[in-house]
């Protein structure tokens, strides 16, 4: 399944973009194979505002956020999830402004159990549950707990608008999301994706964690679902052909040629597919090797 990726994003690092009514974007200068051109920090409202995803610990990005909001007040600091490209900047922003932090909770996987990519120093001042509401003077957000990419991942629907939806790293227009066990969970990701699909036309504009905005996301969500199911089918086919294999051994027949930087993450996502299939009774784990049932 071909996914219609959107990769045109001309916003300069540190610049401010009016992305939608009542929503501004500041782009952090932390480009990589996994962050595209950098992390999007979202400013919500006017005058008394929320900042969603302050990004990594980056003095230049902190200065850009504060410069963009000169003469305004930050009343809420929101975190979509505790990966190190999204939440660590909350500490310095809070120190500079005194604003409380909001998020689902702490990173769920300890460092010694595979949670090395997490920001284990972040604990929100206010825990936001699924369906929780966070609001300011001229904005209101409803949280959706969408685990899969990260166990504590939140999306936010911007109420009272023409369908603006902060999808963070759950759905991004520039690429698929990495799902790396144990904190990444493919079964949970697919359930979260189904939940977003079921929202239908309620969401007309996705404002993502990386990359440009994604208008009219419904066809894109359908393509993401088809892509994941196709990848799952290829995994089963490759495993039947091999007899037994490790997740790493399945990467070439399932993914084909890859940027060397992506081979490791591809193996992690493939492992997540295998764990999901194991839970469904389709494959069996034998140490680090797998076989079909």
Image (spheres, rainbow, N blue to C red):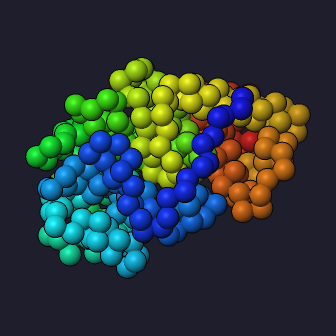
Q: Is residue 156 visible?
A: yes
Q: Give the image location of residue 229, x and y in percent.
A: 66, 28
Tell me the residue at 10%/46% (across/down): 137
Viewed as shown, does residue 253 lie left or right of 218? right
Q: Is residue 191 visible?
A: no
The residue lying furthest to the right in this view is 241
Q: Is residue 43 above or below residue 271?
A: below
Which part of the image, by quadrant, shows the C terminus? top right
In the foreground, 218 or 18: 18
Q: Give the image location of residue 141, x and y in percent.
A: 23, 40
Tell me the residue at 83%/36% (across/down): 238
Viewed as shown, does residue 53 lie left or right of 36? left
Viewed as shown, does residue 81 lie left or right of 72? right
Q: Quarter-wise, where is residue 68 in the image?
A: bottom left
Q: Quarter-wise, where is residue 53 in the image?
A: bottom left
Tell me how many marks there are.
0
Tell me the residue at 22%/54% (across/down): 50
The residue lying furthest to the left in this view is 137
In the foreground, 189 or 30: 30
Q: Quarter-wise, where is residue 119 in the image?
A: bottom left
In the foreground, 182 or 143: 143
Which part of the image, by quadrant, shows the N terminus? top right
Q: Is residue 217 above or below residue 177?
A: above
Q: Give the image location of residue 18, x and y in percent.
A: 36, 51
Tell me the residue at 49%/38% (across/down): 214
Q: Give the image location of residue 209, x and y in percent.
A: 45, 51
């Amino acid at each position: 399944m071909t996914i219609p990726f959107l990769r045109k994003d001309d916003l300069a690092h540190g610049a401010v973009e009016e992305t939608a009514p009542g929503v501004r974007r500041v782009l952090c200068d932390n480009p990589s194979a996994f962050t595209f051109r950098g992390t999007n920090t979202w400013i919500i409202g006017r005058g008394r505002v929320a900042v969603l995803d302050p990004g990594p610990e980056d003095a230049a990005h902190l200065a850009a956020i504060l410069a963009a909001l000169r003469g305004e007040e930050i009343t809420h600091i929101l975190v979509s999830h505790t990966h190190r490209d999204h939440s660590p900047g909350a500490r310095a922003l809070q120190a500079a402004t005194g604003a409380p932090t909001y998020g689902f909770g702490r990173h769920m996987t300890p460092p010694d159990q595979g949670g090395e990519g997490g920001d284990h120093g972040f604990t929100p001042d206010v825990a936001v549950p699924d369906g929780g509401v966070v609001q300011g003077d001229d904005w209101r957000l409803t949280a959706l707990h969408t685990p899969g990419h990260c166990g504590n991942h939140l999306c936010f629907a911007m109420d009272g608008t023409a369908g603006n939806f902060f999808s963070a790293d759950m759905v991004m227009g520039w690429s698929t999301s990495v799902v790396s066990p144990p904190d990444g969970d493919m079964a949970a990701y697919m359930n979260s994706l189904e939940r977003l699909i079921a929202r239908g036309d309620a969401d007309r504009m996705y404002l993502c964690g990386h990359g440009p905005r994604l208008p009219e996301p419904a066809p894109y969500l359908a393509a993401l679902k088809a892509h994941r199911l196709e990848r799952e089918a290829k995994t089963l086919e490759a495993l039947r052909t091999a007899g037994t294999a490790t997740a790493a051994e399945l990467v070439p027949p399932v993914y084909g040629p890859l940027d060397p930087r992506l081979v490791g993450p591809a193996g992690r996502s493939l492992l997540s597919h295998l764990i999901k299939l194991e839970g469904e009774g389709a494959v069996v784990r034998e140490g680090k090797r797998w076989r079909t049932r």
